[in-house]
Image (spheres, helix red, strand yellow):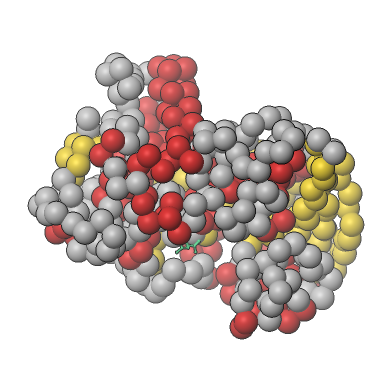
Amino acid sequence: MLTVITLYSTAQNEFEPNYDESKVPVFDLPNPLVTFNGKEVKTINDWENERRPELLEFFIQNVYGEVPDHLAITSFKIIEQGENALGGKAKRKQIELSFTKNGEELSYNILLYLPIDVEKAPIFLGYNFYGNHTVADDPNIIISDAWARNNESFGITNNQLTEQSRGIRTNRWAIEKMIDSGFGLATIYYGEIDPDKNDMTDGIHSLFYSKGQEKPKSNEWGSIAAWSWGLSRAMDYFEKDADIDASKVIVFGHSRLGKTSLWAGATDQRFAAVISNNSGCGGAALSKRKFGETIWRINNSFPHWFCDNFKKYNNNEEQLPVDQHELLALIAPRPLYVASAEDDKWADPRGEFLSAYYATPVYELYGKSGISNSEMPVVNNPTQSSIAYHIRTGEHDVTDYDWEQYIKWAKEYVLK
Ligand code: GCU
């Protein structure tokens, strides 16, 4: 065991979220550089051949769930493209990926904006919450007909996306800043891979079922692993697209989709770098702190996100032989950015920061630097190296400020 963080142990009501730092329990944090059997990890070889595989396997079997089988893209087609997007700065492509298995089919669309003057563009890849047509005010973006959560202010009733929400999330996607800095953007509506509701009969899961099966086995994938699988299949496509530099795909996600980007980065080493924006519980935040959202709470509110085995740790974080800093360590030595927001206490900003700090020794094994100071930086004062971290003012959100930091960091740590 690596360390005991914190202060006083106080009994806590397991159903009320704790926001009081003095009530964070005393806990032992597992050391990423000691195997489950107590052997010290001293070399990259030990890490890559022993410790990393056992950690990855633990997260697969007990947290996010195993993908039951292999399934490659059955076919893809470019269904729309335009050379004159974003006032002539970018080219737009919309690509449909299709999958067939056991007589069932699923398709989803990737929306791409690529800088016109870059031959093979590095890209940010990230899911959106309400459809590709929300990320830019562009009449050519196809509106998805997949299930969507109702949202009156976005004009979503009967679980159908509509024209009314075109461009409504441009504030969360600094596309022009990306394009002006030589990056492209690829985005996908996450509901096309698996609708975000506690019903496992639909989405990509159903293609893998045997006859009569209605939900995955207890060690098999929840929705986060399904969404993350969708990002890897997008990566399969990028490897075939001559306009993209597939060795420079930075996987990004906010909140539940930040949990997803971390899991995608951990399971698929083709992703060059990973960004977690306000990912919180089950993402970057340390579970054992039980600050804000807890394992019990997340498994109750969103029973479909993780595998059923994860429920063993409801109100039982002490028994968990890993914590989320080890998820971050699985991304080493690739660049990793963890970002928090000051008013997003639910996601436990300090727990996100400490997780990045405790993942650092694995980066150091590779001669990379991470977060070397256990003091949290003050707000709006990013610390950037192979692991970067910032906490900005404001709420649970993605802002221009966040993107400015990601772009600056990606130029330095991904492009160079
Ligand atoms: C809820 C959930 C979080 C999640 C967030 C989001 O608040 O409890 O775990 O990150 O939704 O995805 O916006």
Front residue of 268 and 321:
321
Front residue of 309 and 166:
309
> Measured from the top left, where is residue 284 in percent x and y?
41, 49
Horizontal relation, residue 20 to residue 295: left or right: left
> Measured from the top left, where is residue 16 in percent x and y?
27, 63
Quadrant of image for the C terminus: top right
Quarter of the view holding residue 377: bottom left
Front residue of 385 and 400:
400
Residue occupying the far front of the picture:
212
Quarter of the view holding residue 182: bottom right
Quarter of the view holding residue 369: top left
Q: Which residue is pictured at 87% across the width and 64% down the height?
A: 82
> Measured from the top left, where is residue 337 in percent x and y?
46, 50
Is any part of residue 413 visible from this angle? no
Above or below, 249 against 93 in this view is above
Is any part of residue 402 visible from this angle? yes
The total number of labels drawn is 0
Quadrant of image for the N terminus: top left
Q: Which residue is pictured at 58% across the width and 70% down the height?
A: 172
Horizontal relation, residue 10 to residue 49: left or right: left
Q: Which residue is pictured at 62% across the width and 64% down the height?
A: 129
> Measured from the top left, where is residue 314 in percent x and y?
35, 46
Front residue of 136 and 67:
67
Q: Which residue is pictured at 12% across the width and 54% down the height?
A: 10
